Amino acid sequence: MSGETVELLGHWASPSALRVKWTLKLKEIEYEYVEEDLANKSPLHLEYNPVHKKIPVLVHGGKPLAESLVILEYLDETWKRNPILPDDPYERAQARFWARFVDDKCAPSILSAFTKKGEEKEKAGKEARENLKILESGLGKKQFFGGESIGFVDIAAGWIGLWARMVEEIADVNIIDTETMPLLDAWFRRVLQVPILKECLPPQDRLLEHNKGFYKNLTGGSS
């Protein structure tokens, strides 16, 4: 089964697609990448993900899977080499918890800080910082959430270190407070320097311009 063809439908600026790329690289899985135009979704994309109509979509042996965290777990269960989830059931459950925390709490509050204005923006920024401080408690003093090597939570959360900095620059709001969350700040810098992850990152200048355009469309360009 693991020898069947693998395709990834994604978008170059998508953190969710980046998660899947990271996992495919870490697990040394050969795949074909298909870039999707999110403003003009392809018939193939809509066929493979008719429910949410979002990327990423992984297609393995003709069978599609959606939702990045679901895809990460599927890849880990199907290709056993270079595991990203712990063997211990409790530790595995903890990894799932923190990954879900990133999606349910951290990402929405960062997006809110990016799209709100005035007092609402400051309130959203405060919530984002509080959520990231909670995330830091899951890291503790470990090198990575996975311990000595990259794991499930590192893949789920690592993108924040790049995207949140751009939110700070574009929207003029503090997200990653280096004084109150020094361990998490250091982890963001460390995880994005891991060579196999770094090589998958989109060009930062192009990503910044893309997000500036996104911000302008959402807010009219005002802060």
Image: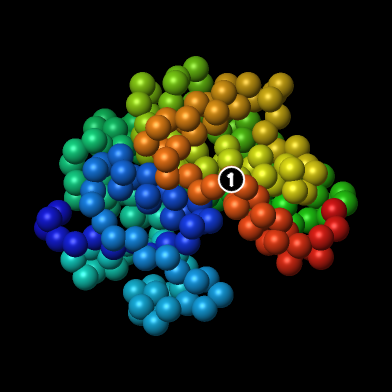
Q: Which x, y percent locates residue 134?
A: 59, 32
Q: Is disc 1 surrounded by few (<14), some (14 to 19) or many (20+) residues within 10 Å?
A: few
**Where 201 sits versus 91, above or below?**
below
Instruction: Answer yes or no: is residue 223 visible.
Output: yes
**Residue located farthest toward the right when viewing the structure as drawn:** 118
Q: Which residue does the image show at 47% across and 61% down from the upper left?
A: 11
Q: Which x, y percent locates residue 181?
A: 64, 25
Q: Which x, y percent locates residue 100?
A: 47, 46
Q: Which residue does the image show at 63% across and 31% down from the upper left?
A: 133
Left or right of 174? Residue 134 is left
Element marked by disc 1 = helix
Residue bearing mark 1: 204
Q: Which x, y percent locates residue 165?
A: 66, 40
**Where 211 sits versus 180, above or below?**
below
**Where 30 sits versus 169, above or below?**
below
Left or right of 189? Residue 51 is left
The quadrant in which residue 17 appears is: bottom left
Position of the N terminus, as image quadrant, is bottom left
Q: Which residue does the image show at 43% across and 78% down from the upper left?
A: 42
Left or right of 28? Residue 108 is right
How many numbered discs sit on the rendered protein? Answer: 1
Amino acid at pointer 1: Gln
Q: Which of 114 and 38 is in front in this view?
A: 38
Q: Which residue does the image show at 78% across and 42% down from the upper left?
A: 173
Instruction: Answer yes or no: is residue 145 visible.
Output: no
